[in-house]
Image (cartoon, rainbow, N blue to C red):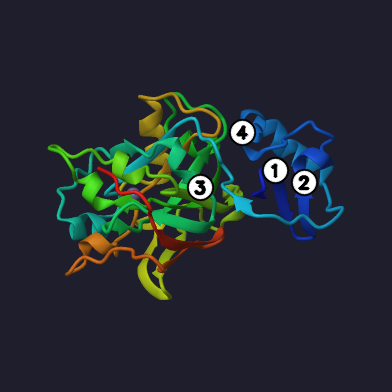
Amino acid sequence: MRLLNVAGRAVLETAEGRVDVATASSGRFGPGPQDLFEVWDAFRSWVRTARPVPVGAIDGPLAAPVPRPPQVFAVGLNYGSHAEETGLAVATDRPLVFTKFSSSIAGPEGDLVLSGDQVDWEVELVIVIGRPARRVAPEQAWEHVAGCTVGQDFSDRAVQMQGSPPQFSLGKSFPGYGPLGPALVTPEQFADRDDLALRCQVNGETVQEGRTSLMIHPVARLVSLLSWICPLGPGDVVFTGTPDGVGMGRKPPRYLKPGDTVVTTIEGIGTMIHRCVAGSEVHQ
Ligand code: ZN
């Protein structure tokens, strides 16, 4: 199943076309995508049995398929190649976890307002929780995942590295710094849900290329470990880390400038496109 957020409404993307969830279910599900995660199992079985079909064209701007996640987890240094390029020591027994505050969530297309001159890109697989997860074993963890989407963990490196010791969350939480989309895709849609190709391009040049099979802590382990500390609930999201090729790791470093276009793609999910624009305010 592929789920879109078209102008705030949950929309199924089927081979025959787009289906508005609230209309097709006579108001039982929806209208927004965030409403679905609380009743995810019932919604999935309705889709399977009702097999709703399109009744007309549905157009409008795409927004984040998970527009208001209650909790946003993000994992740093989860690919060996990226940990190396940052020069930061990587502990392989436990993941490095921080948050992107939920006001950073945005849609899969549009402008990215730059907060400064050290804003960097990070393509990431983002997983969305369906069934509540509390102290689940890795073997059961995927059963709690509603689906996967493409994410960008845009990062203002100057703000991220401020302070001693630095905290990662604020520099990654400016408005628009956590775009999601274009679709939420359920895990059974993938030939191998643990081996998806991810790519980031800036102005047409491929700057990041990797596979999710190279994660140090794979999805099942991340969900399990997080669930032992924080109960995970419907609509929570986890940014699972980025492969190498970020701007900070380059010599000299390279960051986003007004006018740049960032294209972010994951195999089997789709592509997000963001255009960088100058911010009008300077942060402290
Ligand atoms: Zn990241």
In the image, 129 versus 56, the foreground residue is 56
User: Which residue of the protein is positioned furthest toward the front in this rendering?
Assistant: 280
> Mark 3 or mark 1: which comes first in sequence?
1
Number of marks in the image?
A: 4
In the figure, residue 96 lies in which quadrant?
top left
Write the residue at 45% across / 36% down. Answer: 102
Dots 3, 1 in contact, CB < 8 A: no
> Mark 2 or mark 4: which comes first in sequence?
2
Quadrant placement of the C terminus:
top left
Q: Which residue is mark 2?
A: 20
Q: Secondary structure at mark 1?
A: strand
Instruction: Give the amino acid type for the residue marked by disc 3 in the picture.
Output: Ala
For the residues labelled 3 and 1, the Cα–Cα distance comes to: 15 Å
Query: Is the residue marked by circle 2 packed among few (<14), some (14-19), or many (20+) residues within 10 Å?
Result: many
Q: Which of labels 3 and 2 is toward the front?
A: 3
Q: Secondary structure at mark 4?
A: helix
